[in-house]
């Protein structure tokens, strides 16, 4: 496994953790401000790895953009949840799933292209 494959796999795992944390928060967990910030696992990957090794790749910008959308939706869902609109927040989890699918598709494109380079 080369470095790019490891980096992509790390981001994939961090993204799945992020999505799980959103779901857990909306089912009674505590909102972790640090986790959902630029200092969280996904944000740290972008600043320490993505923007260092893959800044020239168009998919990196797309991934960052989709993650920002995910983050905005996650915060909106938490606001719904914390204001007592729990069922509505749970219903809107579908939007997280759709964005996650988009994120993982772009990540797969980046992974495939980086395999061709090696």
Image (tube, rainbow, N blue to C red):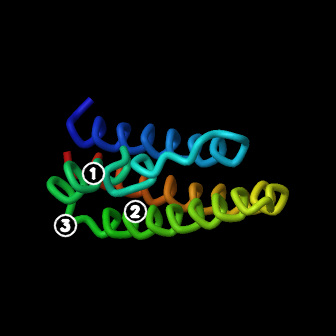
Q: Residues within 10 Å of mark 2 (few under 14, many from 20)?
A: many
Residue 117: percent from the left, percent from the top?
Answer: 21, 51
Earlier sequence position, callout 1 versus callout 3: 3
- The answer to which of marks 2 and 3 sits earlier in the sequence is 3
Point out residue 39 in the picture as x, y percentages from the top left corner.
Answer: 31, 51
Q: Label 2, on which residue? A: 63
| SS for dot 2 | helix
Kindly tell me whether residue 73 is visible in this rendering.
yes
The location of residue 3, given as percent across then percent down, is 20, 37
The residue furthest front is 83
Q: Residues within 10 Å of mark 3 (few under 14, many from 20)?
A: few
CA distance for labels 2 and 1: 15 Å
Q: Nearer the viewer, residue 59 or 116?
A: 59
Q: How crowded is the residue under tag 1: few (<14 C-alpha within 10 Å), some, or many (20+)?
A: some
Where's the N terminus, which quadrant? Answer: top left
Mark nearer the N terminus (2 vs 1)? 2
| Residue 114: mark | 1
Q: Which mark is residue 56?
A: 3
Looking at the image, residue 77 sits to the left or right of residue 43; the answer is right
């Amino acid at each position: 496994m080369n470095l790019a494959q490891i980096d992509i796999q790390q981001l994939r795992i961090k993204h799945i953790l992020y999505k799980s944390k959103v779901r857990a928060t909306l089912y009674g967990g505590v909102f972790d401000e640090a986790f959902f910030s630029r200092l969280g696992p996904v944000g740290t990957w972008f600043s320490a790895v993505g923007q260092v090794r893959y800044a020239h790749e168009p998919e990196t910008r797309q991934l960052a953009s989709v993650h920002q959308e995910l983050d905005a939706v996650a915060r909106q869902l938490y606001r719904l949840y914390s204001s007592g609109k729990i069922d509505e927040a749970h219903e809107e989890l579908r939007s997280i799933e759709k964005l996650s699918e988009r994120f993982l598709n772009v990540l797969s494109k980046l992974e495939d292209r980086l395999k061709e380079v090696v």
